[in-house]
Image (cartoon, rainbow, N blue to C red):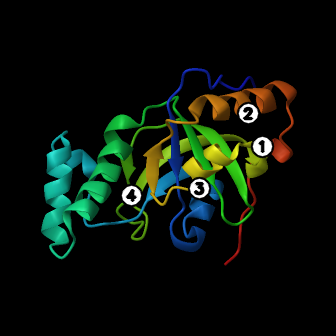
Amino acid sequence: MKKPSPKGKTIWCIRAGQQGAAHNLFIERSLIVLAEQGFGDLRNLPKNRESFYSTYAKRHADEGSTAIAGIGGTFFRFIHEIHNGDLVLYPCLLDKKVHYGVVSGPYAYAKSQKEFPHHRKVIWNGAFEKSNLSEFARRELGAARTLFKVNNNAEEIRAVICKLSAASLTQGGGKPKKVNK
């Protein structure tokens, strides 16, 4: 199967939660997920950032404006700005690699998944050592945010992914291993 080219695609970086809590959902179910924050099904909110901010603020009145904007914005991006075909990076703390794939499905809300009900399907294409990146790119991927668009080092990351895809250097299909906790 030919892998989609990363050229020109938006690149997103996502975390698996505290201590990699969502790692197995990422890997076993080929999902990227966000933790429950009291939003419910995001499809029920109006398609503007202010609605996400106000919904979060109502449920977390003790939070400051920076946290409200940050968390509200994360959920807005997850449903409205990430598109099928976009690249996604998962810098895994467990194996110290950067896993990369392509978003392959729309937003879904799984009410039965209490901890991580917000889902998007992803096809993992491979992984690479962080040492393949410059210090600047490693620092950008190390940002303390749950979900963000990679901007400053996107071309460098695309080049690494293209090189790996062209050379078929990923081992075991590049799929990260399940971790038992």
Residue contact between numbered discs 2 and 4, judged by CB atoms under 8 Å: no
Residue at 64%, 49% in the rendered image = 138
Q: Nearer the viewer, mark 4 or mark 3?
A: 3
What crowding class fits label 3: few (fewer than 14 Cα within 10 Å), some (14-19), or many (20 or more)?
many
Q: Hey, which residue is sitting farthest front in the picture?
A: 136
The CA distance from mark 1 to mark 4 is 36 Å
Q: Camera-side residue: 150 or 117?
A: 150
Q: Which residue is mark 1?
A: 132
Q: Which of the two labelled residues, at mark 2 and mark 4, occupies the earlier sequence position?
A: 4
Q: Tell me, for residue 65, which label it has, or none.
A: none
Q: Which of the two labelled residues, at mark 4 and mark 3, occupies the earlier sequence position?
A: 3
Q: Amino acid at mark 4?
A: Ala
Q: Which of the two labelled residues, at mark 3 and mark 1, occupies the earlier sequence position?
A: 3
Q: Secondary structure at mark 1?
A: helix
Q: Which of the two labelled residues, at mark 3 and mark 2, occupies the earlier sequence position?
A: 3
Q: Give the image location of residue 81, x and y in percent.
A: 36, 36
Q: Which of the two labelled residues, at mark 1 and mark 2, occupies the earlier sequence position?
A: 1
Q: Secondary structure at mark 3?
A: helix
- Asked if residue 29 can be seen in this view, the reply is no
Q: Amino acid at mark 3?
A: Phe
What crowding class fits label 1: few (fewer than 14 Cα within 10 Å), some (14-19), or many (20 or more)?
some
Q: Which residue is mark 3?
A: 26
Q: Which residue is mark 2?
A: 160
Q: Tell me, for residue 110, which label it has, or none.
A: 4
Query: Against 7, is 27 above or below?
Result: below
Q: Amino acid at mark 1?
A: Asn
